[in-house]
Amino acid sequence: MKIITPSFILLSSGLVKNLSVAFDKEVVLVAPLKELLDRFKDAQTIECKADTVLMPGLVNPHVHLEFCANKADLQYGSFIPWLHSVIDKREELLSRCDTKLISQHLEQMLKGGTTAIGAISSYALDLKATATAAQKVRFFSEIIGSSPNMVDALYGDFVARLDESMGITREGFYSGVAIHSPYSVHPVLIKKALKLAKERDLLTTAHLLESRAEREWLKSSSGEFKPFFQKFLSQDRAVNDVDGFLKLFRGLPTLMTHANYANIDELKELSQEQHTLIHCPISNRLLGSKKLDLHKVQEAKVEWILASDGLSSNYTLDGFEQMRAALMMQDELELEPFALELLNGATIRAADALKLNCGAISTGRAADMLLLDISSNTEQILPSHIILHKYPILEVYIDGKAQLGESHGRS
């Protein structure tokens, strides 16, 4: 048992003072220090330096690690030119993205405060790195392919990758199923993959309505996607429409990523089916998508969380940077309440969406926590301060174990 006493603690309800946290592998109790010392007489006390904040570790529920080699190889600004650049550079980028590079990025994410991720894996190139990572991992094996002639081969490859991921037995590693998108996966493949997910009780995720081009293609088989599908797949018509795609997920709560171009009826469908919307603000901006209307999302009572997407459409996997971007982009939302919503969307709500028992400093939750040096003698700190200022991270805890060496104080 350990007891830590920071200046402030970030709970899901907001910031509090004059409390300490008793924890081992899980958070045991949040209470005044004297109460904890009386109750846990043999506990090891961790003395923090002045002016610190203890907060939950960040949870990034949607990240593509297999494109970590990208820096300036791909074209930003609009979705279709970006997609063409991905096709042109894919083999080169994948060949440069080995286990060592992915592990380096996972280590950077850890030092930046990310203690759990949802990894979207198309090729299983990230399996070894995530299997040995410090973070908790929900590993989503992704299925993609819209050609009816390739259904059996694509499904067989998907099952082989899924079986390999389910063979990983380390604590904190869990499998899942990813359906790439309605424009890129044949409905027969979707049905087969979702049937398997239900049989194995696996969490599911999918991309949805990320771009205007996708919306036009799914609605009328027209727009910018038409020449793309004609050129690469000899297809003239979309294999799904939005309504038909969403119907396939009924009864199966799913993490739906982006949804920038979802209308109010589609958002209500997400809410009714208890799907979770994953918002990737920087990725959306770089690929020319319109700003997600979070006010409309909230009106439709859709649960939303925050993620980075991958380095194919982002310059950083840092969770605080995603929150800063969203805080600035969503200018119609009141600053401080929205800042707390962002912090919860990057911690407790993201953890719950991934079905991970972390994301909050609360009794019974995994002791995945960050200790921040706020570098200021202050009587008050606000949620926006945590997001806006790149406070040094003194320690990262996962399951109560210090990952950086507990260099912040004396014990």
Image: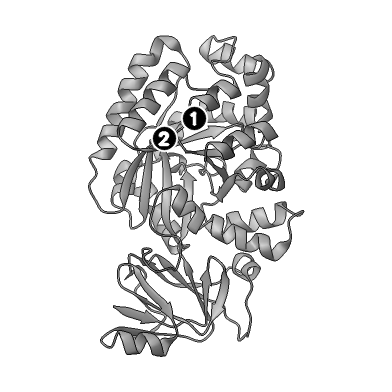
Disc on res. 112: none
Label 2 sits on residue: 94
Q: Is residue 43 left or right of residue 16?
A: left
* Vertical position of residue 188 compared to residue 258: above or below: above
Tell me where residue 331 appears, x and y as whole percent: 75, 54
Q: Is residue 321 left or right of residue 2?
A: right
Based on the displayed image, in which of its 4 quarters is residue 35 positioned?
Answer: bottom left
**Callout 2 secondary element:** helix
Tell me where residue 307 appears, x and y as whole percent: 53, 49
* Vertical position of residue 277 compared to residue 319: above or below: above
Taking the image as drawn, is residue 28 in sight? yes
Disc on res. 250: 1
* Vertical position of residue 22 compared to residue 205: above or below: below
| Residue beneath the point at 74% across and 60% down | 334
What is the C-alpha distance between the residues marked 1 and 2? 34 Å
What amino acid is at disc 1?
Arg
Tell me where residue 249 appears, x and y as whole percent: 48, 29
Quadrant of the rendering where the C terminus is positioned: bottom left
Closer to the camera: disc 1 or disc 2?
1
Quadrant of the rendering where the N terminus is positioned: bottom left
Closer to the camera in the image, 276 or 78: 276
